[in-house]
Image (cartoon, rainbow, N blue to C red):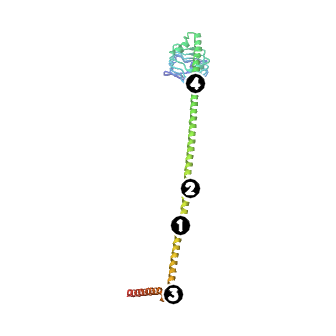
Amino acid sequence: MAKAAGKSVNLRDKLDGNELDLSLSDLNEVPVKELAALPKATILDMSCNNLTSLPSEFCALTRLVRLDLSKNQLLQLPSEFGRLINLQHLDLLNNRLSVLPVSFSQLKSLKWLDLKDNPLDPTLAKIAGDCLDEKQCKQCASAVLQYMRAIQSEQDRQRQLQLHAQREQEKKRDAEQRVRDAQERELRRREKAEEKERRRREYDALRAAQIEVDKKSENSKSQPRKTSASASLPSVRTRSWIGILLGFIFGGLLCTLGILTVCAVTDLKNQPLCTSVNSMYEEMVFRLQNHKILQSVLHHNSQQ
């Protein structure tokens, strides 16, 4: 059931063979679902209604051969209108159309077209002609199809140019990206090389420092030995001088004892030299005895 300005319309009541007459039904929208349920209807008359547009689903009625949309208020046709490839007769008289969809060029079976009394684009209006009789309406269909095909071809060409320009732009971007990638790889390679060189210099510096430390350590170990050797030399020299001195003293004592002995027991004791030596010996003995006496007295006093 189709709705028309407050009332329902039974489409099957309007079907006569393969012709469905919905003209003068006060329709303000197209009953697409109901039309799809009538596959036998290949001729559709929806003239003299209040239609302002056709839904895109209408283009699925590809079985249509003849379509009358005259005396409505259509502002435009669906962009997929070209799907009606079996359409041979199309009446668009007295609507509000200014242009036709580019897909119109796909209506290869179209033989008759009426576009009178529409505010068409001047170029399209000139191509469509007056369509005052059967011959002119057939010429209108042929000329308009040719014109729309030219527009379609130009659009395809523009689309191809755009695609080509996009591909070229993509190629250019890819080439630029490859250049940037190569530059980044080269930069990373240089950074790695510089980092490697820096680590190598640090390693060489550390190794040189370690060698220097090892040399200083060896020098410090060898220095005490030299010092001890040099210090031992004066010690040896000191000991040698002390030995010589002790030798002299011991020799002197021996000589003195020898002289005292000679002067005490030999016939030389009356000689002047021996007399002096004996006097000196007796005096030294006397002083030593006095010194012992003094020490004993002091020791005795200290005990008291």
Q: CA distance from mark 2 to mark 4?
A: 73 Å
Q: Amino acid at mark 3?
A: Val
The x and y percentages for residue 290 are 41, 87
Q: Report the quarter where the C terminus lies.
A: bottom left
Q: Residue at x 56, y 53 (%)?
A: 208
Q: CA distance from mark 1 to mark 3?
A: 48 Å
Q: Amino acid at mark 4?
A: Leu
The x and y percentages for residue 248 are 51, 78
Q: Which residue is mark 3?
A: 262
Mark in front: 1 vs 2: 1
Q: Amino acid at mark 2?
A: Ile
Q: Residue at x 57, y 26 (%)?
A: 165
Discs 4, 1 touching: Cβ within 8 Å:
no
User: Of callouts 2 and 4, which one flags the residue occurring earlier in the amino acid sequence?
Assistant: 4
Q: Secondary structure at mark 2?
A: helix
Q: Secondary structure at mark 3?
A: helix
Q: Which residue is mark 2?
A: 211
User: Of callouts 1 and 2, which one flags the residue occurring earlier in the amino acid sequence?
Assistant: 2
Discs 2, 4 touching: Cβ within 8 Å:
no
Mark sitting on residue 161: 4
Q: Quadrant of residue 219?
A: bottom right
Q: Secondary structure at mark 1?
A: helix
Q: Which residue is mark 1?
A: 230
Front-most of residues 138 and 60: 138
Query: Does residue 89 show up?
Result: no
Q: CA distance from mark 3 to mark 4?
A: 150 Å
Discs 3, 4 touching: Cβ within 8 Å:
no
User: Of callouts 4 and 1, which one flags the residue occurring earlier in the amino acid sequence?
Assistant: 4
Q: Residues within 10 Å of mark 1 (few under 14, many from 20)?
A: few
Mark in front: 3 vs 2: 3
